[in-house]
Image: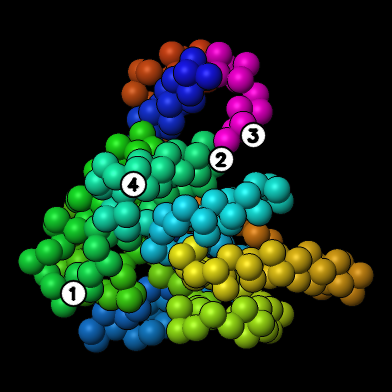
């Protein structure tokens, strides 16, 4: 088992070598980021939703990892072959208590299953209100996530959706892409699973463009509701197919990454050889 784990870790490390080459400032992703407007900026210019992208849904989860909620969500997504973004707080995984070690192991498993682990700061601080903490909160979370997964985070979500020019600048310096949302059932206000499902499914039925759904894997209402929401998407797509209407396409984090090709490093032939060797471990992720 240690041999398999070692090879899997190498695979994650190689992915990290490649992914950190993306330049967040080099090109604008086509998928809207749904950020709050900066002072003096109109809401339309900040979010820029586009129906030309069609009905699409990106699943994101905040405030984890949670040993119960995150694990159950990962299992449900894995069963359906879906990928999500998990924006985690570094303070859940930075210490060496048994529960912290278990949460770090959980992040490794998320990465092995093809999910993306994003930066949600160390302590869930409003960085535009506590600007002296910006560097520590961003860099601390990035370092512990990289330690746990062997992949430096590419995406960042600001707690409370806070946004200011200084934060934008700090993130650009670190090649971190800031990601917002445009659908938030606010399940953190209570544990009403039925209300969460109703809000989300009604909004998805009405939507004609891209959606970034914000849920919290620390809330059992969201954990329980996820299966019902995904069942609705399947039923809605079946109805749309019969009616000749656009279906909801569930997308993953790749829609947020710049389309600019990576520059060649000289390591490509060697990486290809190692990737081929790792291919012999097909189905490895199903073990976790």
Q: Position of residue 141 (x, y in %)?
A: 26, 51
Q: Residue at x 61, y 20 (%)?
A: 281
Mark 2 neighbour density, 10 Å: few (under 14) some (14–19) many (20 or more): many
- Using the rendered view, name the quadrant where residue 167 is placed: bottom left
Farthest residue in the right direction?
Answer: 242
Disc 1 to disc 2, how far (Cα)?
Answer: 34 Å
Residue 113 marker: 2
Disc 3 to disc 2, how far (Cα)?
Answer: 8 Å
Left or right: 26, with 259 as reference point:
left
Q: Secondary structure at mark 3?
A: helix
Residue depth check, mark 1 versus mark 2: number of the one nearer the observer: 2
Label 3 vs 2, first from the N-terminus: 2
Residue 282: in magenta span: yes
Left or right: 241, with 19 as reference point:
right
Disc 4 to disc 2, how far (Cα)?
Answer: 20 Å
Q: Which residues are magenta?
A: 276-288
Residue 100 marker: 4
Q: Position of residue 283 (x, y in %)?
A: 66, 28
Label 1 vs 3, first from the N-terminus: 1
Mark 1 neighbour density, 10 Å: few (under 14) some (14–19) many (20 or more): some
Label 4 vs 2, first from the N-terminus: 4
Residue 286 marker: 3
């Amino acid at each position: 088992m240690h041999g398999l784990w070692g090879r899997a870790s190498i695979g994650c490390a190689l992915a990290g070598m490649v992914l950190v080459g993306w330049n967040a400032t080099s090109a604008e992703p086509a998928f809207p980021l749904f950020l709050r407007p900066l002072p003096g900026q109109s809401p339309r210019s900040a979010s820029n939703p586009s129906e030309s992208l069609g009905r699409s849904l990106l699943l994101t989860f905040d405030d984890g990892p949670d040993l119960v909620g995150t694990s159950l969500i990962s299992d449900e997504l894995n069963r359906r072959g879906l990928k999500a973004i998990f924006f985690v707080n570094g303070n859940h995984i930075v210490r060496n208590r048994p529960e912290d070690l278990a949460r770090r192991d959980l992040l490794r498993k998320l990465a092995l299953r093809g999910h993306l682990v994003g930066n949600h700061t160390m302590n869930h601080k409003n960085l535009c209100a506590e600007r002296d903490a910006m560097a520590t909160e961003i860099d601390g979370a990035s370092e512990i996530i990289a330690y746990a997964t062997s992949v430096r985070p590419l995406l960042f979500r600001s707690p409370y959706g806070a946004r200011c020019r200084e934060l934008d600048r700090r993130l650009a310096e670190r090649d971190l892409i800031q990601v917002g949302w445009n659908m938030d059932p606010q399940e953190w206000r209570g544990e009403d699973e039925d209300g969460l499902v109703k809000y989300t499914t009604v909004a998805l039925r009405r939507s004609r463009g891209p959606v970034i759904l914000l849920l919290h894997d620390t809330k059992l209402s969201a954990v329980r509701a996820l299966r019902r929401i995904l069942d609705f998407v399947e039923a809605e797509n079946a109805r749309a197919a019969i009616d000749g209407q656009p279906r909801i396409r569930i997308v993953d984090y790749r829609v947020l990454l710049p389309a600019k090709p990576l520059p060649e490093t000289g390591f490509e032939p060697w990486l290809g050889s190692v990737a081929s060797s790792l291919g012999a471990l097909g189905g490895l992720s199903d073990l976790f």
